[in-house]
Amino acid sequence: MKALNENIQIVVGDITKYCGDAIVNAANTSLLGGGGVDGAIHRAAGPELLKECTALGGCRVGHSKITDAYNLPCKKVIHTVGPIWYGGSFHEREMLISCYKTSLQLAVDNHLASIAFPCISTGVYRFPKSEASQIALKTISDFLAQSCDQFLKITIVCFDKDSASYYS
Ligand code: ADP
């Protein structure tokens, strides 16, 4: 575990085991589940999560929606839709920034005190890990600096040590 400042920590592990208030799901626009972390979250939460997601009517890239967490140990799931990387000329960076900002804003709006993020878009969506990690850290740090919520604790859960190395 690596503490960047007192509000942000980096861990290696499975985000479905996170026991804080909320986890962020790297979803797709349908919000109906998929592979990677999305599939793992739906499997661990159980079928009720898909039922609630079905009623949400999807979500645009860079936006986020919140649901209950059902069988997961956390209380809420924030579903955010990361951009697919097409080389960097299609507003991918702005959309990734927006994923972090809108997820954090939902956490504040719902009075959540602790939230865990996966490395959004760095799996099948192919966003370069180096740039994605810098965007994640800067956006979270800027949000915390500007937010009046001094108590929000952020954990970035990397699935493997290689991903975690980009955050040091
Ligand atoms: P995306 O479509 O946004 O790229 P992926 O699920 O393919 O989403 O990958 C996003 C990141 O989540 C990758 O770094 C992947 O290694 C990681 N990941 C996959 N499963 C888990 C899990 N159970 N917990 C935490 N991170 C995970």
Image (tube, rainbow, N blue to C red):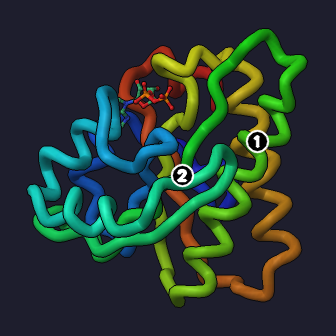
Place of residue 60 in the rendered image (x, y in percent of width and height, measured from the top left): 62, 50
Pick the residue in front: 157 or 67. Answer: 67
Place of residue 21 in the rendered image (x, y in percent of width and height, measured from the top left): 37, 74
Q: Is residue 13 visible?
A: no
Instruction: Answer left or right for 18 relative to 107.
Output: left
Q: State the mark number for residue 80.
A: 2
Quarter containing the C terminus: top right
The picture quadrant where one finds residue 24 is bottom left
Which kind of residue does numbered mark 2 sit on? Thr
Q: How many marks?
A: 2
Q: Earlier in the sequence, mark 1 or mark 2?
A: 2
Pick the residue in front: 151 or 57. Answer: 57
Residue appearing at x 37%, y 29% in the figure: 159
Residue appearing at x 60%, y 63% in the figure: 103
Place of residue 115 in the rendered image (x, y in percent of width and height, measured from the top left): 48, 65
Place of residue 96 in the rendered image (x, y in percent of width and height, measured from the top left): 72, 40
Residue appearing at x 65%, y 56% in the figure: 63
Q: Which residue does the numbered mark 1 point to in the structure image?
A: 95
Quarter containing the N terminus: top left
Which kind of residue does numbered mark 1 sit on? Met
